[in-house]
Image (cartoon, helix red, strand yellow):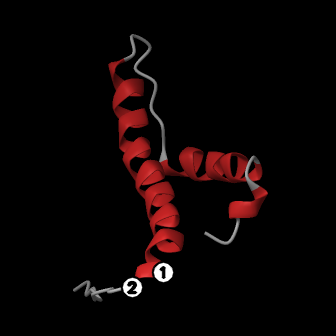
Amino acid sequence: MIRSCKFLLRPAGRQQAPLAQPLRDHCFLCDGAPQERRQACAHPSKTKIEYGDQSARLKEIRSFAPQRQGR
């Protein structure tokens, strides 16, 4: 059985802005991965994109923004 925990985060006013950007970045990457796989399957070549391929490309994506490495 897989268990997960959820924590409610209630940041103070000045903490919201610094926390919002990493969340947007994460959502962008998480939403983009399934979309990329769907587009690859819909392509006439029926290319398959595996998790390992996408994970390897994340390193390339992060190298373009070294100031965001901690996120």
Residue holding disc 2: 11
State which quarter of the image contains the C terminus. bottom right
Neighbor class of circle 2 (other Cα within 10 Å; few <14, some 14-19, many 20+) is: few
Q: Which residue is more in the foreground, 28 or 9?
A: 9
**Residue depicted at 41% across the width and 81% down the height:** 13
Vertical position of residue 35 compared to residue 62: above or below:
above
Element at badge 2? Answer: loop
Residue holding disc 1: 15
Instruction: Count up the numbered dots.
Output: 2
Element at badge 1? Answer: helix
Vertical position of residue 29 compared to residue 38: above or below:
below
| Callout 1 touching callout 2 (CB < 8 Å) | yes
Describe residue 10's horizontal placement relative to residue 1 as left or right.
Answer: right
Percent from the top left, x then y, of residue 22? 52, 65
Residue 3's disc is none
Residue most extreme to the top? 44
**Residue depicted at 58% across the width and 44% down the height:** 53
Neighbor class of circle 1 (other Cα within 10 Å; few <14, some 14-19, many 20+) is: few
State which quarter of the image contains the N terminus. bottom left
**Residue depicted at 37% across the width and 47% down the height:** 31
Q: Amino acid at mark 1?
A: Gln
**Residue depicted at 77% across the width and 58% down the height:** 66
Q: Quadrant of residue 38?
A: top left
Describe residue 10's horizontal placement relative to residue 49 as left or right.
Answer: left
Vertical position of residue 54 compared to residue 35: above or below:
below
For the residues labelled 1 and 2, the Cα–Cα distance comes to 6 Å
